């Protein structure tokens, strides 16, 4: 036996509510716009992530909201008007935008008149660095149930897509203070500095690098594949010097020098270690 189908829900009558009937004043409407749930609806309609920074009291027309879009770093000014748009509020919107240096200006109202929508479109054309958006709010009720708000984006730049506002470059962190040299490091630095001064004074073909507080230092001798290295041995109070051969001709060069071993050692006045 087939199971009985559940009854379909009863259809209710869809009724549009006049905003000025529900919100009796600009102040109550602006307070509703500033609520977290309303800002979430605004964010979804604008593809932003809004959070109130401050509630800006305007000179003539009630309350505006200065928000931050935390996804793109934009300053967003939200101007609220429960009734139909008028030129007075348009002027106030532009004045507040200049005062607060907003990147995005949102005009929320119950009805956009054609001339004011055209004004926002013109502002978007002449000010590419600032975006002017128009949001029209509708309030609906089905039967006796709770009402629902719906925002419609009716004015925007032609290429409306949020671009991240350039953030200032962070100041570079100061270089950490170098660790003080140990006594041994300072002795090495002094020794190599003095040796480099001697080589320069004598016009030697041996060219040192920059003295460092290390026990080993390299020296160029003016020929590729040949380099001198000097090492300080504090334990035996000695200075070791070696000629290091590198590259594909290192072994042939080594044997050519080895053939002159006796003459080289005689000129130096000491025996050498050949490796």
Image (cartoon, rainbow, N blue to C red):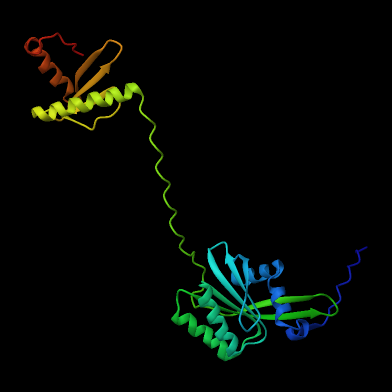
Residue 201 position by quadrant: top left
Q: Nearer the viewer, residue 177 or 93?
A: 177
Q: From the viewer's perspective, is 39 left or right of 176?
A: right
Q: Position of residue 61 (x, y in %)?
A: 64, 83
**Could you tell me if residue 182 is visible in this image?**
yes
Residue 194 position by quadrant: top left
Residue 109 position by quadrant: bottom right
**Could you tell me if residue 225 is visible in this image?**
no
Q: Is residue 60 above or below residue 210?
A: below
Q: Position of residue 270 (x, y in %)?
A: 13, 9
The residue under the point 46% across, 60% down is 167
Q: From the viewer's perspective, is 102 left or right of 169?
A: right
Q: Is residue 25 above or below residue 226?
A: below
Q: Position of residue 232 (x, y in %)?
A: 26, 18
Q: Position of residue 168 (x, y in %)?
A: 44, 59
Q: Nearer the viewer, residue 70 or 254?
A: 70
The residue under the point 84% across, 78% down is 11
Q: Is residue 173 above or below residue 55?
A: above
Q: Is residue 190 above or below residue 13?
A: above
The residue under the point 25% across, 19% down is 231
The residue under the point 50% across, 72% down is 101
Locate the N terminus by quadrant: bottom right
Callout count: 0
Locate the C terminus by quadrant: top left
């Amino acid at each position: 036996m087939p199971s009985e189908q559940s009854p379909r829900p009863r259809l209710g009558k869809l009724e549009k509510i006049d905003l000025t009937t529900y919100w009796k004043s600009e102040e109550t409407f602006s307070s509703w716009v500033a609520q977290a749930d309303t800002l979430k609806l605004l964010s979804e309609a604008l593809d932003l992530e809004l959070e109130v920074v401050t509630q800006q009291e305007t000179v003539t027309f009630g309350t505006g909201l200065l928000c931050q879009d935390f996804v793109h770093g934009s300053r967003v000014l939200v101007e609220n008007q429960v009734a139909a748009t008028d030129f007075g509020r348009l002027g106030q919107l532009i004045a507040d935008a200049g005062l607060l240096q907003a990147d995005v200006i949102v005009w929320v109202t119950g009805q956009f008149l054609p001339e004011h929508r055209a004004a926002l479109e013109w502002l978007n054309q002449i000010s590419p660095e600032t975006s002017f958006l128009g949001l029209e709010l509708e309030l609906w009720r089905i039967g006796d149930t709770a009402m629902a708000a719906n925002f419609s984006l009716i004015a925007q730049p032609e290429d409306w897509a949020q671009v991240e506002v350039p953030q200032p470059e962070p100041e570079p962190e100061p270089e950490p203070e170098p660790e003080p040299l140990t006594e041994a490091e300072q002795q090495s630095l002094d020794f190599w500095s003095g040796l480099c001064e001697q080589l320069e004074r004598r016009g030697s073909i041996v060219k040192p690098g920059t003295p460092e507080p290390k026990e080993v230092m390299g020296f160029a001798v003016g020929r590729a594949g040949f380099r001198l290295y000097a090492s300080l041995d504090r334990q035996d109070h000695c200075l070791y010097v070696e000629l290091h051969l590198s590259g594909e001709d290192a072994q042939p060069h080594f044997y050519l020098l080895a053939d002159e071993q006796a003459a080289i050692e005689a000129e130096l006045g000491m025996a050498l270690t050949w490796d």
